[in-house]
Amino acid sequence: MLEARLSSFLREGQRLQVSAAAVGAVALAVVLLLLPNWLSGYWLRITTSVLMFATLAQAWNIITGFTGYPAFGNTAFFGVGAYALAILVTKAGLGIPAAIVLAGLAAAAFCAVIGLPILRLQGHYFAIATLALSLFVREAAANLGWLTNGAIGIVLPTLASGSPEEITRPYYYLMLLVLVACCACTWWVSVSRFGYGLRSIKADEDAAACFGINTTLSKLVAWVLSAFFTGLAGAVWALWITFIDPQSAFNLAIAVKFSVMALLGGLGTVAGPVLGALLVEVLTQAIWGAFYAVHLAVLGLAIMLIVLLMPGGLMQLLRDRLATAKRLLATPSAKESWR
Amino acid sequence: MSATVAPALDVRGVVKGFGAVRAVDGVSLAVRSGEVLGVVGPNGAGKSTLVNIISGLVKADAGEIAYRGVPIHRLSPDEVARLGVARTFQIVKPLRDLSVIENVMVGALFGRRQCRSTREARRIAEEALAQVQLGHRAEAECRKISTGETKKLDLARALAMDPDVLLLDEPLAGVGARESQTLIELIVGLAKSGKAILLVEHVVRVVWTISDRVAVLHHGAKIAEGPPKEVAADDQVMAAYLGERYIREVLQRPADDAEPGVSSDGDGGP
Amino acid sequence: MESFQFVVNGLMLGGIYAIVGAGFALVYGVMNVLNVAHGSFIMIGAYLTYWTVTLLGVDPFVTLPASAVALFAFGYLVQRTVISRVLHASIFMTFILTFGLDMFLINAGLVAWGGSYRAVRPSYADDVLIMGGLTIPYVRLVVLVAVVAVIALLLLFMSKTRLGIAIKATALEREAAQLAGVDVKQIDAITFGLSAALAGVAGGLLAVVLPFGPFMGVPLTGKAFTVAVLGGLGSMTGALYGGFVLAFAEIGGVIALGGEWADGIAFIILLVVLVLRPRGLLGKEFFAEVKV
């Protein structure tokens, strides 16, 4: 029995790949846990920022990469998470851990409410609606002064004091925790029954319904998950920068950045968005260092180049390379096995 | 239509208009378990619209549809599918980015079977692919397979859903002759095993060969229904609505087709 | 009196929105691209007018044809070199590509001209027309006339010239237009150029009535989205109506809710229309099929 299981396990190369990926992920996790001991305050901040954007890109990946709904306005949930945390901490006096979780849930709940009507739209219409949502929420945050302090913004208490490393460290770990949870969720989506449903919706929503998939519920759950992690990231971000206002919390440039990252890395894959976040952030830093005064203009150009040169993303590039290599290696023996 | 047991699929007086056009005009059909009902008619006769209505993709303006006596015409497509009514598509919709077997797994995971484990779904999908003789292409990317293979994939996915009623929308279009024979045998076998099959097909000869009964649609209305031989013998129906070519095709069949008497089942039309 | 002011302002703003939205809608109708950088074209138009007036001392309205030509050339080139490469790509590609372009243009503007607000003030900036009990600034009247002229020219161009008809045909049925001998790639580039030219003119007009800076285009892109959706995505004439609807809704909203909500109103209108009538508020669509 055990033997049969084992052999069937070994026969499936894909499973092996998955377990290799799992081992890699654990090794990576260990490195990430130890990383703050080796980095300067400056690089620790950059790394924390990579973790945050990786979370945002990954969360976006769930609704956009797997489900095919271009939710460019996910910044709405980032901002809602940030504001929920700020309000819960400063006005309700809640503890930090509870406030973070509740902030994520607030973003998820907000998504659940607005999701049903907006998810009836598809393609460009959906994209526009999510953008409008994000911009509207920003206006609302600016104008509902009794709750949000309006354009003045909210100041938050700091978590730690001391050297730059010590100040950043707690946010690094919090962000890491959120990212790991988000990646775990995305991995589950990539292998689960639920994920098959999402990928079917991405390919053809009408057909998916005919195969028995409750498309309305599936895509809503996908977006709510996406909003939850985006909200968590927003909450930790608010704690980290200790001051939020509508302009910074609902900044569409954040959406541009995380979507470029996910796209560059590869939508619909688990590793892609994280890889993309790392690359784009490194690129941003390099551009910032080299073209200080004009770095945003150069970054804009870089984004255009990325889209033009790598439309399929890094993961696609890697997969193609791998496939070519396999084919080259397999050519001599392949003919025989075809017989 | 007064069977003691409710038919597996009972369509009554279904009407659907698009603008000024009545795509389906008061069609009534019943399919019993173990039976193949062929639906024929020229292009634009409303065959595909009918399948879309039964599967819940398109809402009818009027009429009722029941699955084993349970009304389903107000249900969404996924609810209909989960009850056990599976369909294939005239223009197949393979799920891009998924391999062939993963496409079929979707049927096992979400159809009537509601399979909770992907491993179990994979096993079911392998069986279904073997049934349509597509097992050797299981791991292929579905964008790289031929038209005929996508048709088989579509059928395998429907089978993986463990359907009780199968709506087949031109399952043989674009399939080669030898593969067609395989699929025809499969469809006959499925009916023998107790499934109710509604077969929409352009290849009239196939419909005549494997259908227990045939319904003819024209301009959205049913103009004849009955055993293939009887419908074929109705020269008027055939000439007026299916054209000369179909008659020749049907008459080429060996012997026994010159029986008079039409059975348009009495209730033809709205 | 107030209501007259309301109408003049509504017409002027509506006309500018209409021009902005029509260009945006044209590009979507022909190429299925939502141009996020549309607002930056407006910004460039505003600066072109500003610098021409400042350096040459000419009347701002005289600069409009020149900046239209300049932006047409710019838009044409951008389409040929960049946009044309992603026409068959997914929505993500076109969106992010034009986001990148927007980012580049805004920051290039910031580097070139600084972040401070500027205004174009012709010599008659403070003159007003007194008619009965009403006082209307001359500048606003001229803007209104210019807006009407631009819209009339655009409509004439689209319905009477071979080129305009070819653009319409390409938007309606690309393959058919191609079969009929239309060089659709050329039409794509011309449409993008036309859209940029309209944006440039709108920018010049805005520069005369409002102070502006490198970021002026960002909210205007949002307005362009709203106007285009109001009119039914891809419909140019729909967008023309949509511009006026949005302008009056905004001005009315500001009167009712206060100035802070001006932008919020546009977005809530956009959301509500999308959810309730995703194919546009204004009935029949000019470019029948909405491509997603």
Image: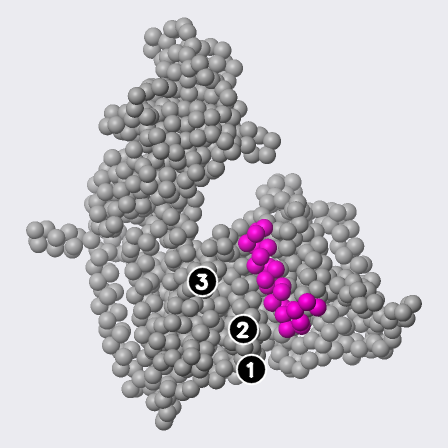
Q: Is residue B219 magenta?
A: no
Q: Earlier in the sequence, mark 3 or mark 2?
A: 3
Question: Which residue does the numbered mark 3 point to in the structure image?
Answer: A111
Residue type at mark 2 is: Ala
Residue that appears at 31% across and 84% down: A36
- Subunit under mark 3: A
Other residues around mark 2 within 10 Å, as few (<14) / some (14–19) / many (≥20): many
SS class of the residue under badge 2? helix
Instruction: Please state the extent of the stretch shown in magenta in the rendering.
Output: C255-278
Query: Principal SS element in the magenta part?
Result: helix
Which sits in the foreground, A327 or C187? C187
- Subunit under mark 2: A
Residue type at mark 1 is: Ile
Which sits in the foreground, A181 or A221? A221
- Are the residues under marks 3 and 2 on the same chain? yes
Which sits in the foreground, B217 or B139? B217
Question: Which disc number belongs to residue A152?
Answer: 1
Question: Which residue does the numbered mark 2 point to in the structure image?
Answer: A141
